[in-house]
Image (cartoon, rainbow, N blue to C red):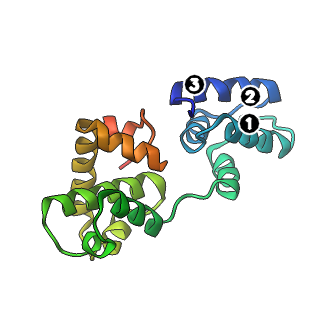
Amino acid sequence: VHPDRALRQLLVCELCSTHEIELVPSAASELVSRCRTRRQLEHQVHQLAAAGPHAEAIGFEQVLDTLDATIPCPDVHSIVSAVAGQLKISVGAMRGSSRRRHVVHARGIAMLLIRHSTRLSLQKIGCYFGKRDHSTVLHAIQQAALLIAKEPLLQRQLVDLGFLDVDNPAVDNPLADV
């Protein structure tokens, strides 16, 4: 069982204190979001501390660089494949023009996870899904967040896949990080 977000935040504070380093709030938040286990948190904080003496708080970019070097973000195709497999539809259907409800829901969930897990713009996400407009992607993300918030079984499946935290702000607030 992985620690929840609140516990991971406490762990980061403890680890930073132990290693005598300070993180800016956005850097600490990114660390908590991307590291799921205590071991990952310990490793990342140790890497940051080992980078040298820090007169100032460690910034967001330095944390991103450290995280990207050791915990790669899932790529678009792996996210889409995982969602397609979990919801039992083809990747082709998700990328196609179907307006069937189950396909639209799966596509929106994949878009939300891609937006949350990568640095891709709405426009680039839309291009991957059949040249959809950025506003279409935004609407799909908002609807998917609402759907996930209403359906605990779906939320649990996405947590089990490792793409979602139980306390993920994107689920509570469809506009978070968009």
> Mark 1 is on which residue type?
Glu
Confirm whether residue 175 shows in the render: no
Q: Are marks 1 and 2 in contact (CB under 8 Å)?
A: yes
Q: Nearer the viewer, residue 101 or 139?
A: 101
Q: Earlier in the sequence, mark 3 or mark 2?
A: 3
Q: Left or right of 124: which side holds 64?
A: right
Q: Left or right of 59: which side holds 124?
A: left
Name the quadrant of the N terminus. top right
Q: Judging from the image, what secondary structure is the residue with disc 2 in?
A: helix
Q: Are marks 3 and 1 in contact (CB under 8 Å)?
A: no
Tag nearer the camera, 3 or 2: 3
Q: Which residue corresponds to mark 3?
A: 7
Q: Which residue corresponds to mark 2?
A: 15
Query: Residues under labels 1 and 2: Cα distance?
Result: 7 Å
Furthest-left residue in view?
100
Q: Where does the image place residue 76, in percent across and percent down from the top left? A: 44, 66
> Mark 3 is on which residue type?
Leu
In the figure, 97 relative to 89: above or below? below
Q: Earlier in the sequence, mark 1 or mark 2?
A: 2
Query: Residues under labels 3 and 1: Cα distance?
Result: 13 Å
Q: Judging from the image, what secondary structure is the residue with disc 3 in?
A: helix
Q: Which residue corresponds to mark 1?
A: 42
Q: Where does the image place residue 68, in percent across and percent down from the top left? A: 64, 56
Query: Residues under labels 3 and 2: Cα distance?
Result: 12 Å
Q: Which residue is depicted at the point 39% across and 47% down?
A: 158
Q: Nearer the viewer, residue 134 or 167?
A: 167
- The mark tally for this picture is 3
